[in-house]
Image (tube, rainbow, N blue to C red):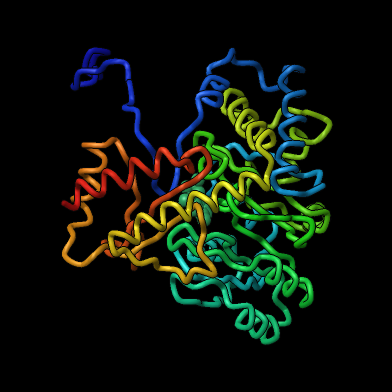
Amino acid sequence: MTIEDFRPTQKITTFYPPQRVLMGPGPSDTHSRVLSAMARPTLGHLDPVFTAMMEELKSLLRYAFQTKNLMTFPVSGPGSVGMEMCFVNMIVPGDKVIVCRNGVFGSRMIENVERHGGVAVVVDDKWGEPVDPQKVEDALKQNPDAKILAFVHAETSTGVLSDAKTLCELAHRHGCLNIVDTVTSLGGSPLKVDEWGIDAIYSGSQKCLSCPPGLSPVSFSERVIELVKNRKEKVHSWFMDLNLLLGYWGTTRTYHHTAPTNALYALHESLFMLYEEGLEHSWARHDRNYKALKAGLETFGMKYVVDERYRLPQLNAVYVPEGVDEKEVRRRLLDEYNLEIGAGLGDFAGKIWRFGLMGYSSKIENIVLCLNALETVFS
Ligand code: PLP
């Protein structure tokens, strides 16, 4: 074999992606301010200018999460890494964890519990319905030895919002810590970590924060930090061990891994934009734009999966109208309008569409484009 034998066989050129409009379940459109932040000169991950920026990033994240938790930072990795980080740090093999499943991401939480040696007690709700606090309370009463309650605040697979405040209160009342998935809610729906008593929370950069994918904001209460510091056995992951990460994201700034510096500039800019807009204004914008899209989708006879009381404004899941080739519609929207919408997952595959209005994608121009495009494709 020579070097030449390993030449790519296809013709390769610089990659220029098309300019799409992203109205699926994430990622969402990225603002040019965020993209240009990413293109600034790369700094070393221990450069004092960079570490000063990290402090601002942590403050901005505390604002977005509405928390004073010192341990609030972005993990280098997608939302799934944030999820895994919570479970791997908080579970000791044999621990019982109550997991609520009302869509795809609750099932992933169960996988995490089991892979880290925990015992999952599953509380099921129908897809499209919120987590039922009564069922959770029953499970907590039946399992007084449970250590953790885990649930998804905003289920992206169905577009339903669960009552995180009530569920977190229930967990504490029964002596459990809680883990809350806010990948789709952060920035788009009201979320108050300290007021609601959330112990461990993770999100994603690519949904209502409108930053490119690949970073997962997390935050941990003092209760979790104590638990992890006092573990008898090592956390079963070197990369995600909170004790070690504290060295880099805490005050000592010791090398842990090479942080993705340019991606972190982007998250800083997107959080700064959220701060400039104001959290409450961002929540209100998501709600306003949902109402505009809903009015349009309903003129085509589309029905929502989720009852109006529990709907996520940033994720509109609707049934595909009878007799329509759902794949073909999505293909035409992409090919003819550069418009991405989402398909259904799991049990909903082939049956629903998911229209995302997340972060910078939540704007009237996108809604007008989408409704006009649907009008043409349906006619
Ligand atoms: N949790 C929820 C609710 C999600 O919607 C997603 C992704 O869509 C994830 C977790 C996983 O995030 P990622 O795809 O960034 O790993």
Total label count? 0
94 lies left or right of 328: right
Image quadrant assignment for residue 49: top right
x 45%, y 41%: residue? 364
354 lies left or right of 282: left
Residue closer to the observer: 260 or 255: 260
In what quadrant of the picture does the N terminus appear? top left
x 61%, y 44%: residue? 282
Image quadrant assignment for residue 48: top right
Residue 351, percent across and down? 28, 65
Residue closer to the observer: 61 or 324: 324
128 lies left or right of 351: right
x 16%, y 65%: residue? 323
x 57%, y 38%: residue? 215
Residue 79, percent across and down? 54, 47
Residue 184, percent across and down? 54, 52
Above or below, 7 against 17 in this view is above
Residue closer to the observer: 72 or 95: 72
Residue closer to the observer: 97 or 154: 154
Above or below, 342 against 96 in this view is above
42 lies left or right of 72: left
Residue 347, percent across and down? 34, 68
